[in-house]
Amino acid sequence: MAKAAKKAGGVSKKTKDPNAPKRAMSAFFFWMQENRDKLKKPKKTKDPNAPKRAMSAFFFWMQENRDKLKKPGMGVADVAKAAGVEWGKLVDKSRWEKLAEDDKKRYERDIAIYKGSK
């Protein structure tokens, strides 16, 4: 009973250092610590003058039908899910596919001009 009283008497465990390694570090981890900055690839920055990508048929359809699908209280994800269901039910998509094809040609033309000017 004396032992139980001693534990209850306020003897506390040592707190561990949260930054201390959990186990011994291998040679690879030491090497990685030293060379991490050299090995990181720089992020590519997007050129603001580059032409915008071509839109798909779904996005052209979505531009026209977003207001019809949107209801008060719906989030962006909910609207997108509802639009996906409606798009799947749609039988004749040729109108929007034609717009997408034209936009793809526009993008190819613009990107050729953009790459030629670089």
Image (tube, rainbow, N blue to C red):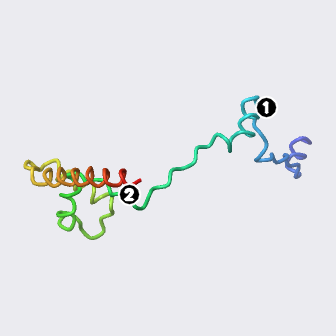
**Which residue is more in the foreground, 34 or 71?**
34
Question: x and y percent of residue 20 in the render?
Answer: 79, 43
Q: Quadrant of the N terminus?
A: top right
Tell me the residue that label 2 is attached to.
50
Q: Residues within 10 Å of mark 2 (few under 14, many from 20)?
A: few
Report, in whole angstroms, how far the alpha carbon at label 2 lies from the one at label 1. Answer: 49 Å
Q: Mark 2 or 1 closer to N-term? A: 1
Tell which tag, 2 or 1, sits nearer the viewer.
2
Question: x and y percent of residue 110 in the render?
Answer: 29, 55
Q: Is residue 63 left or right of residue 33?
A: left
Residue drawn at point x = 15 percent, y = 50 percent = 97
Contact flag, marks 2 and 1 (Cβ < 8 Å): no
Question: x and y percent of residue 24 in the render?
Answer: 79, 31
**Which residue is more in the foreground, 77 or 37?**
37
Residue drawn at point x = 22 percent, y = 56 percent = 83
**Which residue is more in the foreground, 27 or 79?**
27
Q: Which mark is residue 24?
A: 1
Question: x and y percent of residue 25 in the render?
Answer: 77, 32
Residue drawn at point x = 76 percent, y = 35 percent = 30
Amino acid type shown at disc 2 = Ala
Q: Is residue 47 left or right of residue 81?
A: right
Q: Is residue 39 above or below residue 87?
A: above
Amino acid type shown at disc 1 = Ala
Q: Residue furthest front?
A: 117
Q: Is residue 59 left or right of residue 30?
A: left
Question: Which quadrant holds residue 50?
Answer: bottom left
Q: Is residue 49 above or below residue 93?
A: below
SS assignment at label 1: loop
